[in-house]
Amino acid sequence: MAVQRGQIGVPYFGLSIAATAARRVVGKAREQTFSRLLDRALLNPAIAAALLKENNPANRPAMRRKEQLWLGNESSTFIDLLEDEE
């Protein structure tokens, strides 16, 4: 192994092993979450419609405009809160 030859240090090797294990755990969790979401979408048409709406490229500009308008409207609330503290 590279550790025995002195090419890499023990801390690096340990970190590499830990990172690989973490990636596997996260990958399994992601896979399980996707599977549950897919099951829910197949059984519940409302969830499927919401997923299609959120992930449709044609809807993204409209959703972005809506978010910007909401933020613009809510900014006055945040400013009022900041001014009340002074």
Image: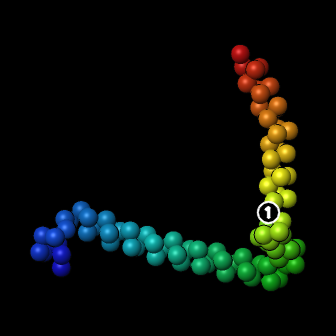
> Can residue 47 be seen by looking at this rendering?
no
**Amino acid type, callout 1:** Arg
Counting from the top left corner in percent of width and height, residue 74 is at: 82, 38
The type of colouring in the image is rainbow
Q: Which residue is mark 1?
A: 60
Which residue occupies 79% across, 35% down?
A: 75
Residue 67 in the image, given as x and y percentages of width and height: 81, 50
Looking at the image, can residue 18 be seen? yes
On screen, residue 1 versus residue 48, left or right, reads: left
**In terms of depth relative to the viewer, which is nearer, 7 or 18?**
7
Q: Is residue 36 above or below residue 72?
A: below
Looking at the image, the residue that sits furthest to the top is 86
Among all residues in the image, which is located at the extreme left?
A: 5
> Would you identify the image quadrant in which residue 32 lies?
bottom right
Query: What residue is at 16 percent from the left and 70 percent from the top?
Result: 7
Q: Position of residue 68 (x, y in %)?
A: 80, 47
Residue 38 position in % (x across, y down): 73, 80
Which SS class for mark 1?
Answer: helix
Q: Residue at x 51, y 71 (%)?
A: 26
Residue appearing at x 84%, y 45% in the figure: 70
Q: Quadrant of the N terminus?
A: bottom left
Q: Residues within 10 Å of mark 1 (few under 14, many from 20)?
A: few
Q: For the C terminus, give its image quadrant.
A: top right
- Above or below, 37 against 66 in this view is below
